[in-house]
Amino acid sequence: MQPLDPDATVLPRRDRIARIGEAAIIFVSIPALSLFIMSIVTFIWGGVKVWKFVELLFDDGVDAPIAVVRLLQAIDVYLLGTVLLILALGFIELFVTPLRLPGWLVIKNLADLKGKLVDVIQVVAAIKFLEKLVLDQDALDVLWYGIAVSLLIGALLAVRWVGKQSH
């Protein structure tokens, strides 16, 4: 009776496990594709917002107080679409294959991906505050909202700063 060669049984098992792991990467394509589709839909939604903004300008004139809010809402939707597109590209870049992207958009790790998301959340929060500032009549409500947005942006900046210090 021959002794069993441990390498003869280990290598095929490792190969099988490696193949399973490599095949699992295809599952990352599902959220990447979903995010890409959502970004397209969001850009179309932004186009509808721009159309409503243009209609408002023709109907009520450029001095309508709601015009600035409608403009900010359109920008807000486009920013959301941009975030979704960046996340889709990030998933592909990280898990599937490198892409030819501008340097500022290259995603090397999950921290880069989260950083892009945090940056846009800050801008969206600021835009929401401007909308509140223009629309709301209650000064105290606007003040509290502004404090809350400032705390959120400050906390997100702190998270980014601590993340950069740890790398």
Image (cartoon, grey):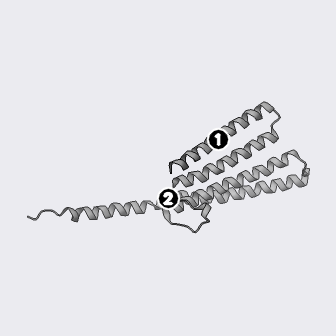
Q: Residue at x 54, y 56 (%)?
A: 31
Q: Quadrant of residue 151?
A: top right
| Image location of residue 101, percent across then percent down | 60, 66
* Relative to 91, 44 lies left or right: right
Residue that sits furthest to the left in the current view: 1
Going by the numbered disc 1, the residue's amino acid type is Gly
Q: Quadrant of residue 25?
A: bottom left
Q: Residue at x 28, y 65 (%)?
A: 12
Mark 2 Cα shell of 10 Å, populated few (<14), some (14-19), many (≥20): some
Which of the two discs, 1 and 2, sits closer to the camera? 1
Q: Residue at x 60, y 64 (%)?
A: 103
| Image location of residue 96, percent across then percent down | 49, 64
| Image location of residue 62, percent across then percent down | 90, 52
Q: Earlier in the sequence, mark 1 or mark 2?
A: 2
Mark 1 Cα shell of 10 Å, populated few (<14), some (14-19), many (≥20): few
Q: Quadrant of the N terminus?
A: bottom left
For label 2, the residue is: 28
Going by the numbered disc 2, the residue's amino acid type is Val
Residue that sits furthest to the bottom in the current view: 100
Q: Which mark is residue 154?
A: 1
Please determine whether, in this image, residue 72 is positioned above or below residue 135.
below
Q: Secondary structure at mark 1?
A: helix
| Image location of residue 88, percent across then percent down | 58, 59
